[in-house]
Image: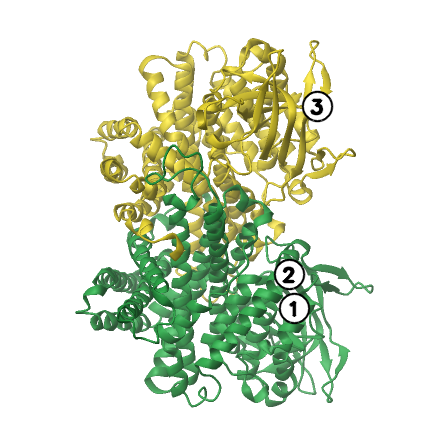
Chain colours: A green, B yellow
Amino acid sequence: MAEYKAPLTDMNFLLYQVFNADKMWQQSSQLKDQVDKETAIAILQECAKIAEQEIDPIARQGDEIGVIFTLNEDGVGGQVKTAPGYKEAFDTFAKGGWCALGGDINYGGMGMPKIVSAFMEEMLCSTDISFALYPILTAGAALSLAKHGSEALKQRYLTKLYSGQWSASMCLTEAHAGSDLGIIQTKALPQADGSYHISGSKIFITGGEHDLTENIIHLVLAKLPDAPDGPKGISLFLVPKFNVDDNECLAERNKVSCGSIEEKMGIHASSTCVMNFDGAQGFLIGELNKGLACMFTMMNFERIGVGIQGLSAGERSYQNALEYAKDRRQGKSLTKSSKKSAQPDSIMVHGDVRRMLLSMKAFNEGSRALSCYIAMQLDYATFASGELQKKGEQLSSLMTPLAKAFFTDLGFESAVAGQQVLGGHGYIREWGQEKLVRDARIAQIYEGTNGIQAMDLLMRKVIGSKGDLINVFTKEVSDYIESQQGNQAMTEFVDPLASALADLQDISALLLTKSADDLNEIGAAANDYLHVFGYTAMAFIWAKMAQVSLQHLAQLENANDEQSEYGVNFYQSKLHTARYYFARLLPRRLSLLATIKSGCHTLFAIDDELF
Amino acid sequence: MAEYKAPLTDMNFLLYQVFNADKMWQQSSQLKDQVDKETAIAILQECAKIAEQEIDPIARQGDEIGVIFTLNEDGVGGQVKTAPGYKEAFDTFAKGGWCALGGDINYGGMGMPKIVSAFMEEMLCSTDISFALYPILTAGAALSLAKHGSEALKQRYLTKLYSGQWSASMCLTEAHAGSDLGIIQTKALPQADGSYHISGSKIFITGGEHDLTENIIHLVLAKLPDAPDGPKGISLFLVPKFNVDDNECLAERNKVSCGSIEEKMGIHASSTCVMNFDGAQGFLIGELNKGLACMFTMMNFERIGVGIQGLSAGERSYQNALEYAKDRRQGKSLTKSSKKSAQPDSIMVHGDVRRMLLSMKAFNEGSRALSCYIAMQLDYATFASGELQKKGEQLSSLMTPLAKAFFTDLGFESAVAGQQVLGGHGYIREWGQEKLVRDARIAQIYEGTNGIQAMDLLMRKVIGSKGDLINVFTKEVSDYIESQQGNQAMTEFVDPLASALADLQDISALLLTKSADDLNEIGAAANDYLHVFGYTAMAFIWAKMAQVSLQHLAQLENANDEQSEYGVNFYQSKLHTARYYFARLLPRRLSLLATIKSGCHTLFAIDDELF
């Protein structure tokens, strides 16, 4: 596999030329002391080194050896041994302070905005999703704890999660109840000392057991015996693997154990555990029966992160496929080569190879930009006030399911496309492409399948707000289109963007109307609607990138602009890729619109027994 | 994983109600003594038993254990041990006479038409592509030998390939020259006795070495020292693993050996070998320098077979996902359920689950019908005469690359969709879905990548014939549309079919015109064109199936028709699925048409260094 090169230039282009994140930081009373352009550039550079030098080298072995489960001698649960190099890499990572990057500064966190930590997640995942999951899930759990935990819990646990001395897991899923959390059966019995005894079994718990850290802190959804039925009876508990005494030292083993691990298609170096709670001591986080709300704090951050996993696989696949395509000589150009030369051309001459590479490039850079935009909205929601904060909340709420599902669908497509560029060499293990496909696939499934994300977007966000949330987005785009009127050079982008926007508005209105008559229209349309929205939002972001690139190219022609630090080629590449996106990827929405308009009839007219 | 149930009803519906294959057999002087409806029904029933009872049970172990390579003590090459059960299953398969199914009757073959052996291939591949590859590649090699080999070679080798006592491999690819066969370097030196000494190295050789049969017959592409450059200097040789003496007994080991095997994403139980020829004795098949022509005899049969591998994975994925979806209870119907009931609904109530299942169903049944149509054209080409034969040759030549690429793309999509229906359970090994995804992926790559198929279709067939070949197909469809004028019940299918046909004709004409100016337009359009053609051809075949179903439903209403042996539900299911296809899958062509029309500019304007 090609050595990974973190796309730092693109990241900095987005932060400082497209989204002006540094200006936003300066204006935030909370952020201005923590982060500025120089700090963030240095952080991302250091992170790139860790990813390239510490994590990338262990990834292949991690895939081949995986995690190994050994039953304890007493038969109650077992140990999980990670692959060679993982413990050392995790220690280096933790010592570098990376587990604290987005953490609360009052407990040892670095308080970086999401827009910075999102880029860290991309780099980690591009080298090894399996490795990245351990710290990413820990950060997610820490976020819930920081927001909803009592002072005592935070004092005791947060600091050690930020230091990487301990790690965390999220225990939601039960065997009978995948994403349907309302019907979970894990029980919490109140104890005299204010703690709870947690009993039940959870499956698919990432990082539920491993040997990277001395303690693992489980955040567990459970119900009190007298709790209301359904989602409104769920509470959130902190259950440490080892209890912690008043001196903050590890005390006795808690009654939680790993029953087994799963054999999976990919992410072999990540432990996916069955976790058994057998009257384990737990501590309430937040209020009783408000556990789902506490989880959702974390969910928006986490789901964007999973979206970024898709992008990370797409980026790695592109880098690998591009290097191969440039080297590999096979066949001839249809137009350029001398037919008499015996030497074949590089496969870069073939239209179909260029199609695959450019699609990957456009999706990767588009997803990175769009994820950056959404992360920025999350940061507005967290750090801004007034209208900006409100809009940040609205847009991040609307676009989180989009990020999760759209980026992971495109990421998987890009992983597969990169594999296709390598032909047979993409199918064998040697070149690493097939690992990317296997690893990328999970991101479409976990943290709520992409079908569930589509329903969250259309049913809960778009229909649930009676169109208000989608209107916030469409107004943003139409204001932008307005702002570009008179900019001749942008016409080629603005016109098709306006057309896509109009279609998105129409189809949203149509579905709002239809939803009043038959909610099955929403279930039937959700997946296609999410993608129509995605292609349109990505067109918006590509138009913005094209505009910034045109500006810098104009300044570079005048040759007196110090800001244009990336040179002509960088901006030309952006412009060409934007044109490719508009010509050859944005049209995908046309089929989706036609499908949505065909209605739900053909899905529901057929009886189950006729399947 | 759900137990495999061979779709015999659907197969018989296609053979005898849609395509009237039995009438074609009766009219063929060659076929009428070999096959009739009763024989073919019995053959497919027996084949289903073998697949369900002998091959299905070994597949999972085959995936987990794979094939094991051991270097010989002398260091020259090594042995390949297949997984437990494979040898026994292959013996049972061979003893049943299945290796002879499509073989030449003069050498012990059964002489079945492709339309029957294609269904056998589907059933074998639905249970285990890895197993199926051994006999399928043997049958392909035997086909070349039967058509082009000398009488002496056929006498010596064909009989034992048909009996399954020996097997065969196809040795084409070299490390530096994937599909670019013109630049292969394997050499053939003429010997005094009329044989050749073959030297060179081949990679990605399926079944190049294994322990299923006592001898392996390699068909090898090589060049004589004085051969012309490029594809016109390639000859085809037969190289047995063990030489055969005049008593047809195995003699000394030939100088061909397996250097290593590949670790792959899937088809773990199939050996993918590096084969080294070190002055091995070989025998010319066909004429010198006409090796590619000899290979292409086999290619059309083989490539349809690979297309069917895609379908087979899609079918298996559907069966598995449907069983899971009916059992799995999670969430509530948006419209039907009592909100107060604590019991969740089966996930069949969710629009998005139905979307995935119905897409799989429509693609599987559509691919099966279309592969049946193409196999029938191959049979016309082989067994008919005059106009029928000519049209059979034209349509099978045109549609072979379509079958290979379109069915494998849809098959992979269906494998992934089935995995998605199972959520997290689809990602773990336990349910078998992830194996289908890993196995299905190879079919888009080998036997000429799907990008190469798209160029074969558009450049060689459509443009190369100046539109003549595609006109043969479009005339067939427009004649069909004509024939349905006045059939009110068919309007819902015929109208959109006519619209799709008109678009296919327009885009073909546009590309013919463009090709005169800039061949890069062809390379840029090829993949999308293939899919436009595919969706349109599948609409044609779905219209035919709907029409036949409507006829039988009308007859069933009159309740006096003995032919309607499958009952109302079968035909209703077909009709509903046809409607789903037209409403929700055929529109995919709209985006593809828009992309093709955008031209090749955005693909070629960007310099390679800007990627």
Q: Is residue B531 rendered to the left or right of residue B353?
A: left
Q: Residue at x 56, y 62 (%)?
A: A127
Check disc 2: other Cα within 10 Å, few if <14, some if 14-19, many if 20+: some
Please determine whether, in this image, residue B413 is positioned above or below residue A282: above
Subunit of mark 3? Answer: B
In the current view of this chain or complex, which residue is farthest to the left? A486
For label 1, the residue is: A89
For label 2, the residue is: A58
Residue at disc 3, secondary structure: loop
Q: Nearer the viewer, residue A206 or A199?
A: A206
Check disc 3: other Cα within 10 Å, few if <14, some if 14-19, many if 20+: few
Instruction: Specify the quadrant of the image occupied by residue B5.
Output: top right
Q: Which amino acid, by three-letter code, is at mark 2? A: Ile
Marks 2 and 1, Cα distance to the nearest angstrom?
8 Å
For label 3, the residue is: B214
Marks 3 and 2, Cα distance to the nearest angstrom?
42 Å
Please determine whether, in this image, residue A170 is positioned above or below residue B309: below
Check disc 1: other Cα within 10 Å, few if <14, some if 14-19, many if 20+: many
Q: Residue at x 30, y 39 (%)?
A: B519
Q: Is residue A59 rendered to the left or right of residue A385?
A: right
Q: Which amino acid, by three-letter code, is at mark 1? A: Ala
User: Could you tell me residue A54's position as x and y percent?
Assistant: 62, 66
